[in-house]
Amino acid sequence: MKGGCLHRLLVSKLCFGVVVLLTVPIIVLLLEGAPVLTIFNTRPEQLKVNSNGIIQQQEQEHLGDDRPSLAGLPGSASRSHTNKDCNYAKGKWVEDDKRPLYSGNECKQWLSKMWACRMMRRAHFFYENYRWQPHGCEMPEFTGPNFLNRMKNQTLAFVGDSLGRQQFQSMMCIATGGKYSPEVEDVGWKYGLVKAPGALRPDGWAYRFPATNTTILFYWSATLSELESLNSEHAVTSYALHLDRPVTFLKKYLNSFDVLVLNTGHHWNRGKFNGNHWELYADGKPVGNGTRLADLSRAKNLTLHSIARWVDSELARRPQMKVFLRTISPRHFVNGDWNTGGTCGNTIPLSNGSEVLQDHSIDIPAESAVKGTRVKLLDITAISKLRDEGHISNSSFKASTGINDCLHWCLPGIPDTWNELLFAQI
Ligand SMILES: *[C@@H]1O[C@H](CO)[C@@H](O)[C@H](O)[C@H]1NC(C)=O
Ligand SMILES: *[C@@H]1O[C@H](CO)[C@@H](O)[C@H](O)[C@H]1NC(C)=O
Ligand SMILES: *[C@@H]1O[C@H](CO)[C@@H](O)[C@H](O)[C@H]1NC(C)=O
Ligand SMILES: *[C@@H]1O[C@H](CO)[C@@H](O)[C@H](O)[C@H]1NC(C)=O
Ligand SMILES: *[C@@H]1O[C@H](CO)[C@@H](O)[C@H](O)[C@H]1NC(C)=O
Ligand SMILES: *[C@@H]1O[C@H](CO)[C@@H](O)[C@H](O)[C@H]1NC(C)=O
């Protein structure tokens, strides 16, 4: 099954009506060339053009009220638990009956159905009862109250692809203890995160916890790069993907974040680029078509380096902000890829070992991008690589097509650990 034509409808502003009519029969939208089983997760930010007036207005309000408060935020005194010399990525998985950190049956308010494995036809949940123990580091107790107290008057933002969205949902469940939390306020409008007319969902979400005045936010940007509409008068719009320019949302809102977690990785393939009509640009000029940057791994490398340098220059002005580049989340398809019958059927935890011993990340482009900058690496690649049994696999009711999801993780699950490692470093 090819999702390309549907996808073209999604990215085309002229096709909103059609998209709405099509939504009911579509269960799983597969985007060619990549193992993404989520529904409609590739709407580029250009769709906001439709609601531009509203966004503009909100931005002014937003910029008007967040600036003066930044100087008064709690500083290093409350960060005494941070263990500066620790390599959190080096350590081992240990059994822990106090895990998971929330119940997959209870956290219905924040978990997408497509990732809540407790709500699926799954027989084993061994993957839930492990904790990551870095070698020689103190891990602070990661609970919702501890996190919210640490984040008083602060905003944590995740910007990235569907794996970033998983980390966001995990954090919402941890922060609320997985309990229904009617007091949590939807503040998406403050960041222009409103559903555009005809869209299936907004480009992200933002929620505020009134008791501590903490905001947790997710913005969907698959490449972290600015997208610019090239020929909006056509039914099928192409986009310049500016490898060396951060996505507009970040430029607008970076100043209101206290902790930022960036990720990108699984959309840097030809299928996604063709399906989305993304054309590579650097230095304001097209660079695809046979040049070195036409190689998408080089293109991604340029984006990672550019964004790390840009954030670094922003950090010079706001040194109390903490920015992390999360390394790539590993896939575990065996005997095929996502669309050629690949599976990840192992149910025995840690069958390939439980320890990570190397000092460096196996995500070399990410590690090299942050080198020499104030951006930190949230290195989860090798850790997560040991957890092939924690993917959605064939648990989903939507897997009847024979497609297994060996990219996304069950929640509760592995992304909870990414957040635990994040908490230890903020
Ligand atoms: C909430 O925190 C923001 C800074 O993140 C601050 O501007 C605002 O005044 C705080 N609001 C309250 C009610 O404390
Ligand atoms: C949060 O912001 C409010 C209002 O600006 C302020 O009164 C309070 O002291 C702040 N709390 C912390 C922990 O910074
Ligand atoms: C790409 O290169 C081919 C041959 O080198 C050329 O004919 C074509 O016009 C180029 N396309 C673009 C969009 O530059
Ligand atoms: C990645 O990009 C940086 C900065 O542009 C460059 O120095 C480095 O050689 C690149 N690495 C690869 C593998 O292309
Ligand atoms: C999922 O796959 C495993 C083996 O890989 C199989 O034992 C199990 O029955 C499958 N579950 C479903 C619901 O198809
Ligand atoms: C287990 O480790 C071996 C050797 O490093 C590797 O080839 C294999 O792909 C791993 N299997 C899984 C399921 O990660």
Image (cartoon, rainbow, N blue to C red):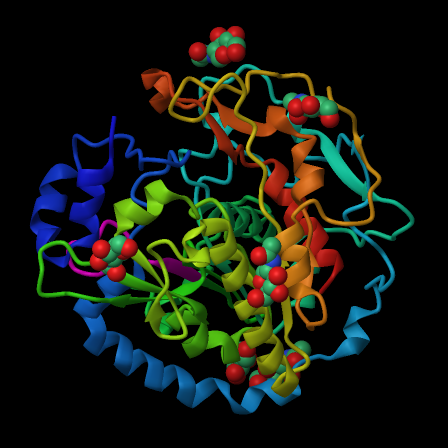
Q: Which quadrant of the figure contains the C terminus?
A: bottom right
Image spot of residue 385 (x, y percent): 66, 34
Say how many tags the image has: 0
Answer above or below: position of 159 versus 152: above
Which is more toward the observer, 321 or 46? Answer: 46
Image spot of residue 85 (x, y percent): 87, 61
Answer above or below: position of 185 versus 297: below
Residue 326 seen in the figure: no
Which is more toward the observer, 354 or 122? Answer: 354
Residue located 46% across and 34% down the image:
115
Q: Which quadrant of the figure contains the N terminus?
A: top left
Q: Is residue 199 magenta?
A: yes
Q: Is residue 292 magenta?
A: no
Image spot of residue 164 (x, y percent): 50, 51
Answer above or below: position of 283 versus 158: below
User: Is 65 left or right of 200, judged from the image as shown?
Assistant: right
Mainly helix, strand or loop, the magenta region?
loop
User: Is 80 left or right of 377, judged from the image as shown?
Assistant: right
Residue located 33% across and 49% down the image:
273
Which region of the structure is painted magenta?
A: 195-206
User: Is 241 left or right of 16, judged from the image as shown?
Assistant: right
Residue reaching furthest right?
136
Residue 75 seen in the figure: yes
Image spot of residue 37 (x, y percent): 38, 33
